[in-house]
Amino acid sequence: MIRKLIKQMLTAQILSALTVSLCLLIDSIMIGQFLGVDAIAAYGLANPLLLVIGAIGTMLSSGAQVCCSKSVGKGSPEETNKGFSSMTCIALIISAAFLLFCILLRKPLASLLGAGTEGKLAEDTADYIAGFSIGAPGSMGALILVPFLQIAGQSGLLIAAVATMTVTDVVLDLLNALVFHGGMFGMGLASSLSYYAALLVGAFYFCSKKCVFRFSLKDVRTEKVRELLSDGVPTVFTMASTVVLTFVLNKILLLPSNGGSMAVAAFSVIMTIINSANCINTGIGGVSLTLSAVLFSEEDRTGLKEMLRLMLRYGLILGICVAAVLQFAAPFCVRLFLPEAGSSQDMAILGTRLFALGIIPCCVISTLKNIYYGTGRVGRTELISTMEGAILPSLAAWLLSLPFHTAGVWLSYPAGEILAIAGIWIAVYRKSRRLIPSAEALLMLPEDFGVPAEDLLERDIRTLQDVTDASKAAAVFCTEHGIGTTVSNRIALCIEETGVNTVTYGFEKEKDRHLSVRLQHKGNRWTLRFRDDCREFNPVTYAANRTQEGGYGIRLVMGMADEVRYTYSMNLNNLTIFLNDKPGD
């Protein structure tokens, strides 16, 4: 079931990751085609500030992803709604403040970024900052909707929002260049309006009766805001590292020996292409983060290991494919931004090919650091992000630029990624003493995490016979743990009744469906989790509304349980039943 879920989520997550980079890609192409190399240089100098806008939105999005995935894993829709309401309010406040800050201080910011105080370069940089900053609430809003739409299983709506944003940005950029002649301000404004268009499409779901989230000012809590921001901090390290690296590389490239403004223009094109290609890393990281947070809150060690293996496999396949495509497509991609032959075009083609090599190891790192993030090793994630994103590539760029000049700067990205993987391997080897680490070793979970294998029973169910076998296995499992017949019978009966209902009514109408059953014993509590990919069905509310007739099996299960939690997330029904050992049972 995890394999199927990953495939469903990965496509939507990669496409939704284009919410920032796609607009930047389109703007860069339009600027290069219609406004020239000097405008491209201004766009490149403004990039660190644009990344700050994305960093704040990504931080909030990741905070919501971790916080709400935990509450989903624990089966607490009330906590999820508090997270949704609190996140909506804090995003609105922060984005509005950022908009005012950038508009009022656009000229000093342009100067700080290296554009100077006078001349066309300074003017174009300030104008683009102003136009793009107007869209801060829209871009942040679009980003924070992503995890909630993923949790709600609305992958199709994510794709529709991205498609709307893309079409809107292309149309408005063309109108700006050919009709209104709004220059760099108009290009930035076109991106802003496209973000609002994407946000509007996504907002339709949250205003509908189908929405599983409910906004309420009463649910906005100070402690929840602190939790959301705290959970999003590791992403700040990632994005801040990107901002720092871009700033450092711009400074190195501005040196006369490295090409000056021509090299900065080439670097702007390279980063736009690579950032778009790196959407696969963003998607891989997003899926790894969401699923690891859910599985970690359920203390599912087996699920985490399976997820890690699959994510590494898919990441490597995607990374190799994208890197290979860019080796051949680099000249074509660069000419979209720099149509005229020259030094900038030549540097950008070489740089795109060299940067593309770093995508492959980046897929591995993105998987690992986001799993560490989702499983609570925040410090480890922050350290990897800082080393991979800023320190190692900056150091590599400085050292390699001395003998190789501009080509040395281009090599800094793959060099930094490879060095970061080497650092992770050393840490894992010191703990496991294995040259080729296993999934268990790579996860580096606390020794007391989850339950021992002897206290865990897992079954995948496809047929009614599987239900019978699982029920019998559970009875034997309970007997082996010295549990009396009362609790043992209750657990076996819960599996039988729930399994039969799911297979009979869920599998009958939909083909290729799965039901997983997980029984674990910890302390004096038994936890029985059912997860299926059938249509949405809440047995808790169903049983409550069937007090007189019908639904006997479901009402029987609800009556036997000491506690029941149900959530519908990521297109999965998740039912968790808790039963406590009682003296004499």
Image (cartoon, rainbow, N blue to C red):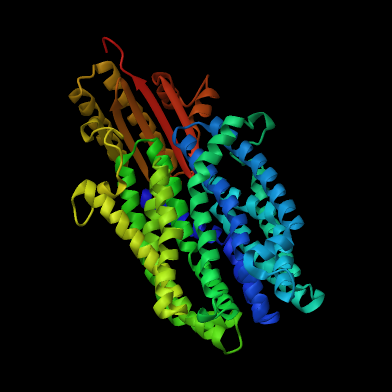
Q: 229 and 297: which one is in front?
A: 229
Residue found at x 33% / y 22%: 525
In the image, 45: left or right of 76?
right
Asked which quadrant contains residue 477, the reply is top left
Q: Is residue 137 visible?
A: yes
- Position in image of residue 74 (x %, y %): 45, 32
Q: 232 and 278: which one is in front?
A: 232
- Position in image of residue 132 (x %, y %): 70, 62
Q: How many numbered marks appear?
A: 0
Asked which quadrant contains residue 447, the reply is top left
Q: Image height check: is 345 above or below 251?
A: below
Residue found at x 66% / y 72%: 42
Q: 320 and 262: which one is in front?
A: 262
Q: Image height check: is 498 above or below 271?
A: above
Q: 549 and 52: which one is in front?
A: 52
Residue found at x 74% / y 52%: 100
- Position in image of residue 126 (x %, y %): 72, 66
Residue at the extreme bottom: 341
In the image, 346: left or right of 4?
right
Quadrant in the picture for the C terminus? top left
Q: Is residue 507 visible?
A: no
Q: Image height check: is 414 above or below 3?
A: below
Asked which quadrant contains residue 267, the reply is bottom right
Q: Image height check: is 479 above or below 361?
A: above
- Position in image of residue 356 (x %, y %): 43, 72
Residue at the extreme right: 180
In the image, 180: left or right of 201?
right
